[in-house]
Image (cartoon, helix red, strand yellow):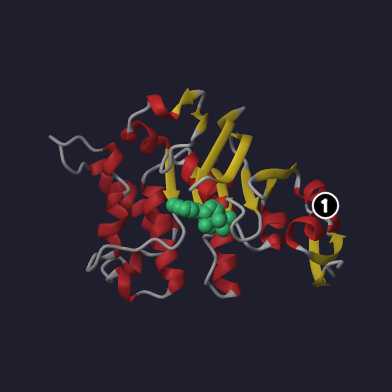
Amino acid sequence: MTIMNTQNIAVGFDGKSVLENLTLEVEKGQIISILGPNGSGKSTLLKVLSRNLKPDQGNVYLDGQNLTELSNKVIARKMAVLPQSPEAPKDLTVRDLVEYGRYPHQQWWQGKSQEDDECVSWALVQTGLEEMSDRIVSTLSGGERQRVWIAMALAQKPEILLLDEPTTYLDICHQLEIMELLAEFNRVHRITVAMVLHDINHAAQYSDCVVVLHQGKIFAVGRPQDVITSHTLRTVFGVESEIKIDNLGKPVVLITGLTKKRG
Ligand code: ADP
Ligand code: MG
């Protein structure tokens, strides 16, 4: 079953095309990763999916409904978004920020409900932040801060979570911690995860589906083992690679050098 899809979306800036005629389906319950070189349009695609950017052409559907016909609140009850390098408002505690995730479920005349408090506490436990709930977000380490944003998204109780490079700037241990956390939400709570990743091996290990963007178009889409090939890496990223298939059938990539350009 499809939870989100785009039909022929196109985006350009200053006459320069960034996404061209892009049609994509996100299956409910899956983890889908978007890969591509810098400037290939990954963040632009994520912004279009989250209605933070209106495409010049084409449509985006959430559960079959056109995003343009849904209110922000209705969208936010289904979809949580973690942008690339988000910045927390100054002086907020961890709990304050996570509470923002409840906004789409609140009515202005009611304020905070018991359910809101329970969801916030649940999200703090899920992300291992209970002990830190009174800390000021800006004083946390990069890995901790990223978990706060993920907690905020979880408190929203979304069906689909969109993330733009959730592990960039983290050390390898904290990168894996975030990947494992997302995999668990997907497995245990059936949250669909669509994310932009830089690390090709993380995409290979954790995704059901990988989309490779190249010059604003989908170069390849499908299972990691079908999409992450030496041919893809050479053509799209300009690197040579050796690829092994591990015992779970997932590709493991070793980059061996730059592809030599002719001429
Ligand atoms: P990626 O996330 O894959 O690195 P982006 O989607 O951020 O790439 O950007 C794709 C291209 O679109 C880049 O060339 C970028 O400079 C351009 N671009 C993105 N947003 C804007 C904007 N608001 N105005 C002008 N150009 C933009
Ligand atoms: Mg980006």
Secondary structure of residue under mark 1? loop
In this figure, which residue is indicated by the disc labeled 1? Answer: 249
Instruction: Choose between 193 and 211: the one closer to the eye.
Output: 211
Residue 208 visible to an observer of this rendering: no
Q: Where is residue 241 in the image (x, y as percent from the top left)?
A: 84, 66
Q: Where is residue 235 in the image (x, y as percent from the top left)?
A: 79, 56
Quarter of the image containing the C terminus? bottom right
Locate residue 13 relative to residue 34 in the image: left or right: left
Quarter of the image containing the N terminus? top right
Task: Establish if 178 lies above or below 27.
Answer: below
Farthest residue to the left: give it: 109
Instruction: Choose between 111 and 252: the one closer to the eye.
Output: 252
Task: Answer with the quarter of the image where residue 178 lies.
Answer: bottom right
Instruction: Choose between 202 and 84: the one closer to the eye.
Output: 84
Residue 134 visible to an observer of this rendering: yes
Instruction: Choose between 212 and 13: the one closer to the eye.
Output: 13
Task: Answer with the quarter of the image where residue 37 lies.
Answer: bottom right
Disc 1 residue crowd, few under 14, some 14–19, many 20+, Cα 10 Å:
few
What residue is shown at x 56% (from left), y 75% (from top)? 171
Q: Give the amino acid type for the residue marked by disc 1 in the picture.
A: Gly
Q: Position of residue 188 (x, y in %)?
A: 55, 45
What residue is shown at x 37% (from left), y 27% (from top)? 70
Q: Where is residue 118 in the image (x, y as percent from the top left)?
A: 30, 47
Q: Is label 1 within 8 A of ligand 1 (CB to nearest ligand atom)?
A: no
What residue is shown at x 41% (from left), y 49% (from top)? 154
